[in-house]
Amino acid sequence: MKPKSKILIIAGSDSSGGAGIQADIKTITSLGSYAMTAVTAVTSQNTTGVNSVISVPPKEIEKQILFTSKDIKPDAIKIGMLHSTKVILSVIKSLNKIKVKKIILDPVMVAKGGFKLIDDKAIKVLKKKLIKKAFLITPNIPEAEVLTNTKIKNLNDMIKAANILLKFGVKNILLKGGHNKLKSINDVFLNKKELKIFKSKRIKTKNTHGTGCTLSSAITTFFACGKTINKSCELAIKYVNQSIRSNVNYGKGHGPINHLSSIKIDRKYR
């Protein structure tokens, strides 16, 4: 099997392997594409929480993006954790040079255990300068509340927030509804021409670490392989649900999902 597309991931590392760049690589590989990386930060974390975050110097992040892309041009880019203003500005500078149109931005702000991963000044720069460069953004409800300065309690609030986000200049939004405590999860897809609600049954499990990173990477992979952005979101949601349903149950806290859920092993390797 040959990779169907080439994807550059710009994100932070998760030492436990459930989220961040590790989850991105696993997702992209499992769905049949080739993953490249630019690491923005190194975290010490496990399923119970984040212990520490060490930033990679912005100049080094820029070098990773440009040097890698000069040799192997990505078909699409997935952006995850960008924790400071300087890092965001260095990423914008790099994106202006490599000119890739298929950019998916997951505006990561808070880790599963509540650890804040980005400062307030950086959030402002993200809103003003980076969001408009993305073809799609994938905020969850708490992230959308921060970006829009609104409270989101129901589906109508999600749609209103998505419309506010459209005004920032992004072409498409997938606002994830997993933080609502309802029996079914509603994810809101919106652009200037279309509103679509993806409904999923909630799976009872504490093992959901890395779902946001995995979803945005899955969308990027399907999109890079030629699917429409709408279809890419639909297929990625199905992949994440399938991965959650596997319930591998590692660790004492919020365990990882099963990124291998899409792979069927050839008989001769069993």
Image (cartoon, helix red, strand yellow):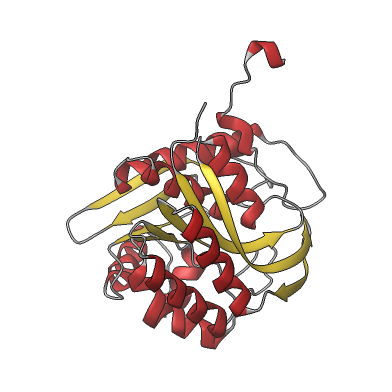
Locate residue 263, reporting x and y percent. 58, 27
Locate residue 96, reporting x and y percent. 38, 73
- Is residue 238 found left or right of 46 in the rendered image? left
Callout count = 0
Which is more toward the observer, 210 or 199?
Answer: 210
At horizontal 33% and vertical 72% (from top left) the residue drawn is: 132
At horizontal 50% and vertical 55% (from top left) the residue drawn is: 71
Residue at the limit of the structure toward the front, as seen here: 71
Q: Quadrant of the C terminus?
A: top right
Which is more toward the observer, 175 or 85?
Answer: 85
- Is residue 226 found left or right of 267 in the rendered image? left
Compared to 156, does 121 lie above or below?
below
Res 220 seen here: yes
Which is more toward the observer, 255 or 40?
Answer: 40
Locate residue 217, reporting x and y percent. 50, 50
At horizontal 75% and vertical 39% (from top left) the residue drawn is: 249
Locate residue 208, reporting x and y percent. 64, 48
Compared to 164, does 181 lie above or below?
above
